[in-house]
Amino acid sequence: MRRLLIFLKYPTPGKVKTRLAAALGDEAAASLYRACAELTLERLRPLQRKTRLCVEPAEALTRTAAWIGQDWSMTPQRGATLGDRLAHATGEAFDEGARGVIVVGTDSPWLSEREVEQAFAALERADVVIGPTEDGGYYLIGLARPAPALFDGIPWSTPQVCARTLARARALGLRVRLLRTGYDVDRLEDVERFAAEVVRERARTQEVSHA
């Protein structure tokens, strides 16, 4: 069994997309987060049967189900830090019998089902799969087996996240496979970039349909 975990926040103004909120305001930033999350779920819906949403805050489970629908499997995130929450969620998935676990967030709505499947395939030849982002973080991390120590001592929300995770993996003797570099939609430039990509994608789709 393969398990995809999507880390999802309830879009409360002032609690999501704080960097964008500085430019757009809390309400607009929350609306943008909601749109990114909904698009992520839409793109990854073909993987729904192997997917679980890890929701923050824990008390927002009912509101989240009302927002995105009752047909997604959901569980609250547990732990004081992001590292704690990642270790708990992946460990729980392995305890339930998963043979490979991929974790993504909702800040990279360009991510496709195909790329997630490629990450699962990469786990057949590696212990850890990472999709790095241009800002020094990562948009995807996958494990072939439990590795809670991988998430220890990482300076979350800094440009050192990916580099420190790679160093931690090497120290633990884990084989790592890197995916293509992506980006998070965290700044106005990222919003514009993603919007332009959507326009190009739709244009290509129309060209194919008329060919």
Image (cartoon, rainbow, N blue to C red):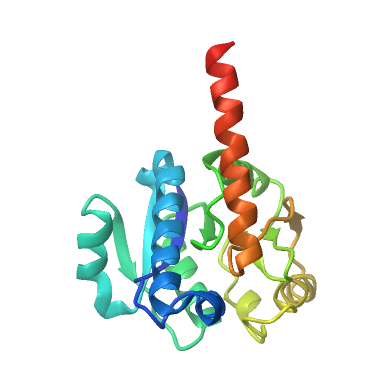
Viewed as shown, does residue 44 lie left or right of 148?
Answer: left
Viewed as shown, does residue 60 lie left or right of 190?
Answer: left
From the top left corner, tell me how far across and down residue 151 is, in percent: 61, 78
Residue farthest along the top direction in this orientation:
211
Q: Residue at x 75, y 55 (%)?
A: 178
In this rendering, is residue 65 above or below 125?
Answer: below
Would you identify the image quadrant in which residue 14 lies? bottom left
From the top left corner, tell me how far across and down residue 56 is, in percent: 37, 75
Would you identify the image quadrant in which residue 55 lies? bottom left
Closer to us: 56 or 78: 56
Closer to us: 189 or 175: 189
In this rendering, is residue 82 above or below 109?
Answer: below
Q: Residue at x 59, y 10 (%)?
A: 211
Q: Can see residue 42?
A: yes
From the top left corner, tell me how far across and down residue 107 is, in percent: 53, 63
Closer to us: 36 or 175: 36
Q: Residue at x 58, y 59 (%)?
A: 191
